[in-house]
Image: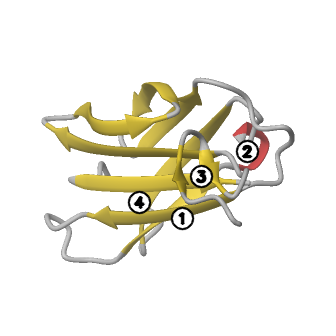
Amino acid sequence: MGGGIGGGGIGGSLVKAITFTVSGGVPTIRKSKGITSLTDHGVGDFTINFSSNFPDIFYYMNFMITITASSSMAVCTGSGADGPLVGSFRVHSVALQSTLLDPEFCSITFSN
């Protein structure tokens, strides 16, 4: 019967996850699974690099993000031509005013 979470996924799906914080403009990976690195392209702009490729670009992304300094809501989006890719996902942390902001806390999961 169906696979639980473990090994590489849920019932045969690939699952990758990352939790990171940003302090003083420097991102730090706190926990990850299936992630090799986090590239910082500037304020609110990151690429999450996977340890192995997804079979295609049709995978799910779920996120939780906290930006308390701005007191405004934020969204986490993939950026047009930059993502998603089979081996990475570029993330923009954007306040409602369309301003890029570094998240204080960000947790993202990917699954096919």
Give the residue displayed 58% in from the left and 23% down from the top: 51
Residue 62's label in the rendered image is 1
Mark 4–mark 2 distance (CA, rounded to whole Å)? 21 Å
Q: Name the secondary structure under disc 1.
A: strand
Looking at the image, do the residues carrying marks 3 and 4 touch, with CB atoms under 8 Å apart? no
The quarter of the image holding the N terminus is bottom right
| Relative vertical location of residue 92 with respect to residue 26 in this rendering, above or below | below
Residue 57 as seen in the image, left or right of residue 28 = right
**Mark 2 and mark 3 in contact (Cβ < 8 Å)?**
no
Reading the image, the residue beneath label 4 is 99
What's the image's color scheme?
A: secondary structure
Three-letter residue code for mark 3: Phe
Q: What kind of residue is marked 4?
A: Thr
Task: Tell me, yes or no, if residue 100 can be seen here.
Answer: no
| Disc on res. 110 | 3
**In front of the other: label 1 or label 4?**
1
Of tags 4 and 2, which is closer to the observer? Answer: 2
Where disc 2 sits, the SS reads loop
Q: Is residue 17 visible?
A: yes
Q: Which mark is residue 84?
A: 2
